Image (cartoon, grey):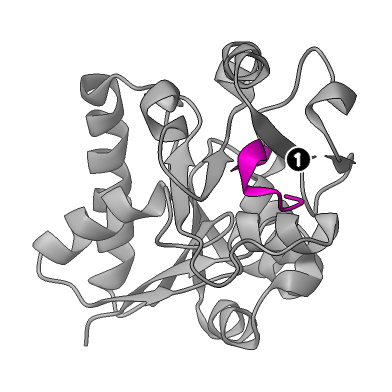
């Protein structure tokens, strides 16, 4: 009997943000897969093990996925990772593949899940608390009211175009392009708030563009509104 692969979103970093379903799946799966070379480098594992301490006794599959936009450099590690996962599934073992935040939003686990599914194995997605929802809660603001549109954008790609969209713009993982994004925002008429490392150690929140530091980490998320809307972001 074949095992099933679960793509498990563990939330943005606070173990208390993990869903009951995620905790149940992690407890029942004998094998845990992570998108890093070692568990000490993996934020999703660090989050999950705080909520489910027994993970330290489970078999671990480490998929060394490089953080690069180069598709060719990414494909080989994903293919090797999929083979490792399928090896366990073919033996009847269920595998939980961890991802930070939600398993459907800019999540690295999706590439592995597609490969495993294409090999004929059963997969299931377990959604988690998205980072932008957690960030808005930390900032004590709403993400959308009445007729407002909400746009979720990757902070490292085509930000100029995205900022022209109406309504609320959520810029995710802006760390690599933070300085460029900040300059673009300074040049426009925007109300901006930011959460850095939301739910993780070293979490910081900023109530305005002026408060924000000159540099920021990878897990930096901005919530942007046009100043003319007259609403506090």
Q: Residue 191 magenta-drawn?
A: no
Question: For numbered disc 1, what is the local secondary structure?
Answer: strand
Q: Is residue 134 visible?
A: yes
Vertical position of residue 25 compared to residue 213: above or below: below
Coordinates of residue 182 in the picture (x, y in percent): 66, 18
Q: Residue at x 83, y 54 (%)?
A: 139
Vertical position of residue 214 compared to residue 162: above or below: above
33, 180: nearer the viewer: 180
Q: Residue at x 43, y 42 (%)?
A: 63
Q: Give, as a single range, the part of the protein colored magenta.
A: 220-233
- Disc 1 crowd rating (10 Å Cα; few below 14, some 14-19, many 20+) is many
Q: Residue at x 42, y 22 (%)?
A: 160
Q: How many marks?
A: 1
Q: Can you tell which quarter of the image residue 132 is in?
A: bottom right
Which residue is disc 1 drawn over? Answer: 193
Vertical position of residue 167 compared to residue 228: above or below: below
């Amino acid at each position: 009997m074949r095992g099933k692969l679960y793509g498990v979103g563990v939330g943005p970093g606070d173990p208390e943000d993990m869903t009951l379903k995620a905790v149940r799946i992690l407890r029942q799966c004998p094998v845990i897969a992570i998108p890093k070379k070692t568990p000490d480098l993996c934020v999703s594992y660090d989050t999950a093990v705080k909520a489910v301490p027994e993970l330290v006794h489970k078999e671990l599959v480490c998929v060394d996925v490089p953080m690069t936009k180069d598709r060719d450099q990414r494909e080989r590690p994903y293919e090797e990772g999929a083979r490792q996962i399928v090896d366990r599934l073919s033996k009847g073992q269920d595998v939980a593949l961890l991802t930070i935040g939600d398993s459907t939003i800019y999540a690295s686990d999706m590439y592995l899940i597609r490969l495993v599914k294409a090999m004929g194995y059963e997969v299931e997605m377990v959604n988690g608390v998205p980072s932008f929802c957690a960030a808005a809660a930390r900032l004590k603001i709403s993400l959308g009211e009445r007729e407002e549109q909400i746009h979720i954008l990757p902070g490292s790609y085509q930000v100029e175009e995205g900022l022209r969209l109406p309504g609320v713009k959520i810029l995710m993982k802006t760390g690599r392009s933070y300085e460029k994004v900040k300059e673009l925002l300074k040049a426009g008429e925007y109300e901006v708030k930011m959460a850095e490392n939301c739910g993780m150690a070293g979490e910081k929140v900023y109530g305005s563009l002026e408060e924000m530091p000159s540099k920021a980490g990878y897990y930096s998320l901005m919530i942007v509104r046009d100043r003319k809307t007259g609403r506090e972001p």
